[in-house]
Image (cartoon, coloured by chain):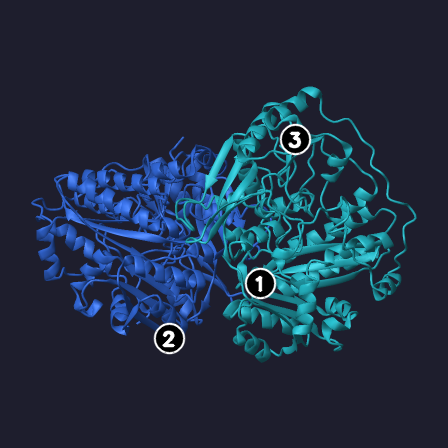
Chain colours: A blue, B cyan
């Protein structure tokens, strides 16, 4: 089974993934939770209560653009578009908290309808939050005032394939597996497989500068985009007349990562590649994280890079060890996953061996591959059991990574221990560059009585550690509302002012995702 | 001899290159000029006449920051900082036209001095044009009002090398060969070798999104930059905490390509690589340009890419044929240059052979390599003889390249023929991407009585053809003042307004390179 065979998942609100394929916690995990002091919460999930939405006149404005049948006002539709999939989002969902619920959900069918909607919403002071996959984990679907959700699910077309240039024009609402299935019919792949793949969409990939598990081979999504169309309240911007240009700043990179704050990306032109005929995944063992880091840095700087390259630290490897299939039962050390989409390059193995790596064969690689989208499924049963589980990610230059990793780990451990809930902190590298790499942390502890506040405190400590140790506040999750203040600190007040000025030009009424990326002025 | 052995050239104002190594036109070229109707102009170059510069009070503002000994007001210094090296620039230089001459030249020694200068100039309404290599060919050193030139030549330091992350921090005024020599001492290379290499600088590479002859292997300069420091009239912006990030838009790409309109880039952090131990260059022959284009597209899309990949069209190849060393005396066909810095990959040759290429061996490759920076030297003796010679460049997606090439060629031929000076139009591809490539045209004709107006008409026709056929107005020369209107058309009025808004935040008094990139508001 390859990515193009995976179904687009109809996400259950408040729980990740395909409800037909839930994940049960292994017994070893339940035991481990006990050691962390995790107790199953007494309170059952609360049902959301409805609250008044738009006036008839406001609904008329929306219906005037898309037709009344494409404006949903019922509780179910609005609740299903409430927030994304961060742990605080899931916890608030369980609490029936409707504070971030849209007042209506609108379903435009084309770029022109999106454009007309934004013009109309600006004229009537209706705030808008775009929604395509709905998989934000950084509060990207919230706003700082009441809003209408624009669901892009009907913009689901592969518009064009240019086989000579190897580009495809995809609409924003095409979800990950649908994009792969459409391209596979013509023999192509996008090669973009983030962990949110089953639910995420082209528009979200672009708006939040997504990076997928095959980034070593295929690059990040912002490196795949060669053209895009942005609808803003002031009109449409089309960018990308060539792969690269020296005609002024690369404005594509100003729109990518703008997270709905400037407008709605309705389609992108992306680089595509022929589907690989073969795939190989294998596991490698290194003595410790430092040795593994040196080995993958060798590949990132001197090549040859595989398509997938990941390295777990000792703690993450030990947790994986609970499944003996993953690590072959060896004791200690760290696990790397090396994957080739396309023919295997034997030189990669030579470099890893020379760097002290031990080839564990295809077993651990194929186990990882089979479970590559399953990790987020674990969070719901963990929350059910009363565990707090969340992720934190960053990136930095190679020379700073050891310090960055230590600082973030220490901040999380200290903050949660101080709150009486000592955590387990796991880490891996999953995206490498010549000059640096990403760090991805998974945190598990017992919940306190107020897990949302508990995590807010821990996350704030992690953010501070990232800033102090010289990392970026996000390598691939984005800014949303959760990272807004940390982002402002990262780029500084003058750069924030420049972005605010761009927003003011494109969205003078401030109706686009207000509070996302930038503080509303 | 490698790039790090080349000297930094003290450019003679108005003539390109090292005056110690002028180029003489071969006899065959002189014959060819006769066929184009070229006649040696009667008028000798005119001497520039001085005109009043700044007031004593204004000079005091500048001297207050950098010291009076670092403010030059003499005609020689100001004339040496007048314009760049486009053909209209050279022609106006020959005419002694001082209309774009700065009122003074200031030489700051540090970022802090640059920052203080910009603050002071904004406060006293003195327009500023940054100058580092001074090699603009798009009018990037002109302005739409009188101005002071900030020469960054004293910011000439390699500040730091991070060998673990393989990055170097280089100041803006470090010129190409100096950067390579500094890095070579530590065993590294930047790998950035534009044709302007002898004169161009790090700051110019960054500000104008330069691309070098080894771009297939090393990438463009905007892909090498991982961090930068920008001084603006409002203060300093520092960007780049990680190789890549999802924290909002990639603002580095908003500064790269801003050409002095937002401020002055005072240093960049760039990716570096170990110096290659070996280099190989060879020539390949293809039946025609279409066959050659298909072959290099194969390499760009499926690999393996060499470090240098260039393809001349029939006309350019035929002109090269005048030197039998270059093409081995073969008749017809087109010439490609394939260069490896580092070990040669035999698969590249297999791909080219399978695509119908004939390996001409190292001869033509080494001839190209030896002369790779000499082509611009030819322009001065050609102008001396009365020829009009200039270049036009663009880029587009592979599927559009044939039409784009035909449209630009036809526009240039028609415009110049209509003016009574039928031209020779040569073309090559020198930068390839998975989804497209650059096109670089060289135009030679006789001069009319007003060659500046003659070229303006031809260039305008070429710009229109580029826009109509779907190319970008510049792949690697930039916007400057020459492409400003075409650039505005390319990105559209709303994107222009967004850039103007960014400029207004960073440069509210409009003192930074007024008229460059954007029309002064």
Q: Which residue is mark 3?
A: B70
Q: Residues within 10 Å of mark 2 (few under 14, many from 20)?
A: few
Q: Which residue is mark 1?
A: B432
- Where on the picture, by quarter, is residue B204? top right
Q: Secondary structure at mark 1?
A: loop
The residue nearer to you, when weighing A65 against B426, is B426
Could you confirm whether marks 2 and 1 are on the same chain?
Answer: no
Placement of A6 over or under A82, stated as above or below: below
Locate the N terminus of chain A by quadrant.
bottom left
Q: CA distance from mark 3 to mark 1?
A: 43 Å
**Contact, CB < 8 Å: mark 2 with mark 1?**
no
Residue A33 or residue A437, whichever sits in front: A437
Judge depth for marks 3 and 2 and give the one in front.
3
The answer to whether residue B452 is left or right of residue B112 is right
Q: Please give the chain letter of the residue carrying mark 2.
A: A
Q: Residues within 10 Å of mark 3 (few under 14, many from 20)?
A: some
């Amino acid at each position: 089974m390859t990515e193009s065979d995976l179904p687009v998942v109809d996400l259950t609100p408040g729980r990740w993934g395909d409800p037909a394929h839930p994940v049960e916690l292994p017994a070893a995990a339940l035991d481990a939770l006990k050691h962390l002091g995790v107790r199953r919460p007494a309170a059952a999930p609360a049902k959301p209560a409805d609250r008044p939405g738009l006036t008839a006149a406001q609904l008329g404005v929306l219906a005037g653009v898309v037709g009344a049948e494409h404006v949903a006002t019922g509780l179910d539709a609005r609740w299903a578009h409430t927030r994304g999939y961060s742990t605080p989002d899931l916890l608030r969902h369980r609490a029936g908290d409707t504070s971030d619920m849209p007042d209506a959900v609108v379903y435009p069918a084309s770029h022109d309808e999106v454009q007309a909607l934004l013009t109309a919403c600006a004229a009537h002071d209706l705030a808008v939050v775009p929604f395509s996959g709905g998989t934000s984990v950084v509060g990207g679907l919230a706003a700082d005032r009441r809003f209408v959700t624009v669901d892009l699910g009907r913009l689901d077309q592969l518009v064009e394939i240019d086989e000579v240039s190897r580009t495809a024009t995809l609409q924003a609402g095409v979800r990950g597996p649908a994009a792969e299935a459409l391209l596979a019919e013509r023999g192509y792949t996008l090669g973009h497989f983030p962990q949110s793949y089953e639910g995420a969409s082209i528009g979200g990939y672009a708006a939040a500068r997504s990076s997928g598990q095959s980034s070593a081979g295929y690059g990040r999504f912002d490196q795949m985009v060669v053209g895009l169309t942005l609808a803003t309240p002031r009109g449409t911007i089309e960018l990308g007349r060539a792969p690269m240009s020296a005609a002024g700043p690369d404005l594509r990179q100003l729109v990518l990562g703008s997270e709905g704050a400037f407008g709605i990306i309705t389609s992108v032109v992306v680089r595509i590649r022929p589907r690989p005929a073969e795939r190989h995944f294998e596991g490698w063992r290194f003595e410790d994280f430092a040795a593994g880091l040196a080995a993958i840095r060798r590949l990132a700087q001197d090549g040859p890079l595989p398509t997938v390259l990941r390295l777990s630290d000792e703690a993450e490897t030990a947790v994986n060890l609970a499944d003996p299939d993953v690590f072959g039962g060896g004791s200690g050390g760290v696990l790397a996953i090396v994957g080739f989409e396309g023919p295997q390059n034997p030189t990669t193995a030579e470099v890893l061996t020379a760097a002290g790596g031990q080839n564990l064969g295809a077993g651990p690689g194929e186990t990882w591959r089979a479970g590559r989208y399953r990790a987020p499924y674990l969070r719901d049963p963990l929350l059910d059991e009363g565990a707090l589980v969340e992720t934190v990610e960053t990136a930095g230059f190679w020379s700073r990574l050891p310090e960055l990793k230590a600082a973030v780990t220490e901040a999380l451990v200290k903050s949660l221990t101080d709150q009486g809930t000592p955590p387990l902190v796991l880490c891996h590298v999953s995206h490498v560059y010549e000059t640096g790499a990403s760090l991805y942390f998974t945190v598990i502890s017992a919940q306190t009585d107020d897990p949302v506040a508990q995590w807010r405190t821990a996350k704030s400590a992690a953010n501070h550690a990232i800033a102090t140790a010289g990392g970026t506040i996000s390598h691939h999750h984005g800014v949303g509302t959760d990272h807004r203040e940390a982002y402002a600190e990262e780029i500084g007040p003058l750069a924030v002012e420049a972005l605010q000025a761009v927003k003011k030009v494109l969205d003078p009424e401030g109706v686009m995702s207000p509070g996302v990326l930038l503080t509303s002025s």
